[in-house]
Image (spheres, grey):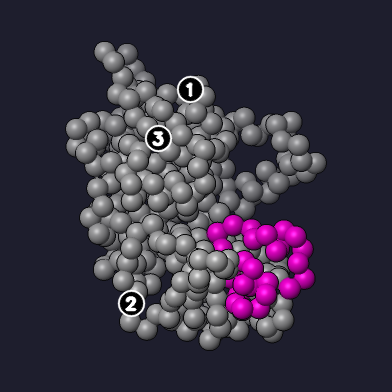
Amino acid sequence: MAKLELTLAVGDYEITKALQDGSVTADGIDLNVLTKMDSTTRHFRFLRNHDFDAGEVSCSSYIAGRDKGFPFVAIPVFPHRRFRHGFVFINTSKGIVKPTDLIGKKVGLKQYQSTAILWLRGILEHEYGVPFKSIDWYTELAEAVEFTPPAGLRLQRVPDNKSVETMLADGELDALIHPDLIQPLIDKDPRVGRLFPDYKQAEMDFFRRTRIFPIMHIVAIKREIVEKHPWVPINLFHAFNAAKNKAMQRMENPRIVPLAWYREAWEEQEEILGTDPWEYGLTPDNTHQLEMLAKFSHEQGLTSRQMPLDELFLPVGQGHKRGHVFRI
């Protein structure tokens, strides 16, 4: 019997490498894996253009799209996570030394809807007392999912010939929240710094308080495929999990990565985050932070209501006490 052919767009990560090279397969599925796109392009092409059968997409944009009835459903696979305190950048001449100094300031964003930025607005409001409506926001990109800004939100697009990174360095913006390291910081431009200079400590403290290692992306599938082939989500979930497990076993070897203190970093991660910080599934920790993301999405005007997780994620269980041991 021929396998079902599906196109899957994901990032080029170690934890998905086995799906790319075919050393891990999804039962009954022939995957055509696409990796040569940056994240924002992949998200836009999947959510707006429906270019792929399944894809890694922004969790924030997915939640917003589901609220509007977009024809996709997700499995609880999280290919990308990242702590975010280190991605709030400031112009060093503006006198910004603590989070509340952002109140009333002009703050740039790559886009309002980015999951990284959704997390940071929520963290700034709930952890540091900086209401998201107290800031003048300036975005650069069109949103992956269009939305109507809520009353009181001060939000505008910068001109097409401007970049929020150069606007920050030039002082046109006071601060910038960005999902990536910005070029002025990489270039060690003295006009640009971080709001949290000791961001790693802030992130570790945040995890110890909340047990949140922020989920950035999920894996979504076209609804028509799930309706026609309801076995696909479960088989894809297990393939992603097997690929991740294979990667983690490989990466435990310090010879794999050309870093002098790589093994020490691995052990530090295990001590703080546990043995599987990249866990998939609706585990208690994952459920906690996904519910928080859904709450932030509604609070910040991206959804009309707080989306419940049973509407956002497909069940991937195989029945009570089934699927753990293979028997013939």
Q: CA distance from mark 1 to mark 3?
A: 13 Å
Q: Is residue 284 visible?
A: no
Image point 57% across, 43% down: which residue? 275
Q: CA distance from mark 1 to mark 2?
A: 46 Å
Q: Nearer the viewer, residue 209 or 37?
A: 37
Q: Quadrant of the C terminus?
A: top left
Residue type at mark 2: give it.
Pro
Residue type at mark 1: give it.
Gly
Q: Is residue 323 magenta?
A: no
Instruction: Name the residue that disc number 1 marks.
Output: 22
Q: Is residue 184 magenta?
A: yes
Q: Nearer the viewer, residue 46 or 228?
A: 46
Percent of width and height locating residue 182: 64, 61
Residue at disc 2, secondary structure: loop
Check whether the beta carbons of the residues at disc 1 and disc 3 lie within 8 A of each other: no
Image point 60% across, 77% down: which residue? 173
User: Hey, which quadrant is residue 231 in on the image?
Assistant: top left
Q: CA distance from mark 3 to mark 2?
A: 34 Å
Percent of width and height locating residue 29: 34, 24
Specify the label residue 191 is tagged with: none
Of the numbered discs 1 and 3, the one sitting upstream in the chain is: 3
Image point 64% across, 34% down: which residue? 251
Residue at disc 3, secondary structure: strand
Residue type at mark 3: give it.
Leu
Of the numbered discs 1 and 2, the one sitting upstream in the chain is: 1
Instruction: Name the residue that disc number 3 marks.
Output: 8
Q: Is residue 272 visible?
A: yes
Instruction: Name the residue that disc number 2 marks.
Output: 150
Start-end of magenta stretch: 165-191
Percent of width and height locating residue 165: 62, 66
